[in-house]
Image: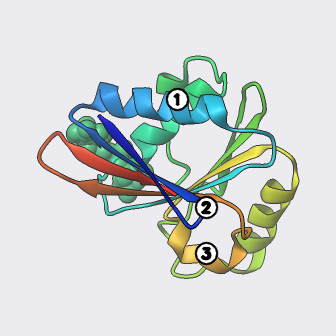
Amino acid sequence: MGLILCWKEKVLSIFKTISLAQTRKIGQAIGQQLKAGDVVALTGELGAGKTTLVKGIAHGLGVKKADETVSSPTFTLIHEYAGREKVYHLDWYRLARVEGEDAFLAEECMRSGGVCLIEWAERGRNLLPAKHLKITMKHAGPSSRQIEVK
Ligand SMILES: Nc1ncnc2c1ncn2[C@@H]1O[C@H](COP(=O)(O)OP(=O)(O)OP(=O)(O)O)[C@@H](O)[C@H]1O
Ligand SMILES: [Mg+2]
């Protein structure tokens, strides 16, 4: 179920999902709307469903078998997938701050004209372009989650 609000020209959408499958569907719908150069910053505690949503977004961007091929690049710097656009998947969980080579590579991705999907994006807030899609996920029960899109 979703709710869309507009405030000061910003659109705020809030979704409540009650299953993994629903989260993927919402991701897919978001992915279908994304364009070359877009940056999606995902925030939310451990297990909030960021990677699950990213699988759906990648699917919506045309990445084949996204459910199987997309996994969090927690211990590598970046995963790259081929969809309708190039898709870069970053995860800054292991970084206290994003700097040095990590920052350099992230900026390269954001400039490349592909779509960047970044988990734990708040760790590198200063690197994000002024215009980005901010997605905040929260636990709302054992199998439900709230997804806020700004
Ligand atoms: N409605 C739901 N949407 C998404 N995940 C759900 C939902 N209900 C239960 N889950 C469970 O929550 C977990 C979400 O894991 P996921 O890896 O997507 O989270 P994450 O936010 O990426 O975590 P991390 O910060 O560790 O990377 C999975 O184990 C999944 O089965
Ligand atoms: Mg994750």
Q: Nearer the viewer, residue 25 or 15?
A: 15
Image quarter of residue 66: top right
Could you say where residue 88 lies in the image, as x and y percent from the top left?
70, 45
- Residue drawn at the location 58% of the way across and 81% of the way down: 97
Does any portion of residue 70 appear in the rendered image?
A: no
Work out which residue is located at the far top of the displayed protein and give it: 64
The numbered mark, 1 or 3, whose residue comes first in the sequence reads: 1
Could you say where residue 10 lies in the image, as x and y percent from the top left?
57, 60
Amino acid at circle 2: Glu
Could you say where residue 32 lies in the image, as x and y percent from the top left?
62, 28
Is residue 39 found left or right of 48 in the rendered image?
right
Name the residue beneath numbered marker 3. 124
Q: Label 2 neighbourhood size at 10 Å, few (<14), some (14-19), many (20+)?
A: few
84 relative to 141, above or below: above
Which structural element holds mark 1?
Answer: helix
148 relative to 130, above or below: above
Name the residue beneath numbered marker 2. 9
- Residue drawn at the location 28% of the way across and 57% of the way down: 138
Amino acid at circle 3: Gly
Q: Nearer the viewer, residue 10 or 126?
A: 10
Name the residue beneath numbered marker 1. 29
Q: CA distance from mark 1 to mark 3?
A: 26 Å
Could you say where residue 35 lies in the image, as x and y percent from the top left?
75, 39
Q: CA distance from mark 1 to mark 2?
A: 21 Å
Q: CA distance from mark 2 to mark 3?
A: 25 Å
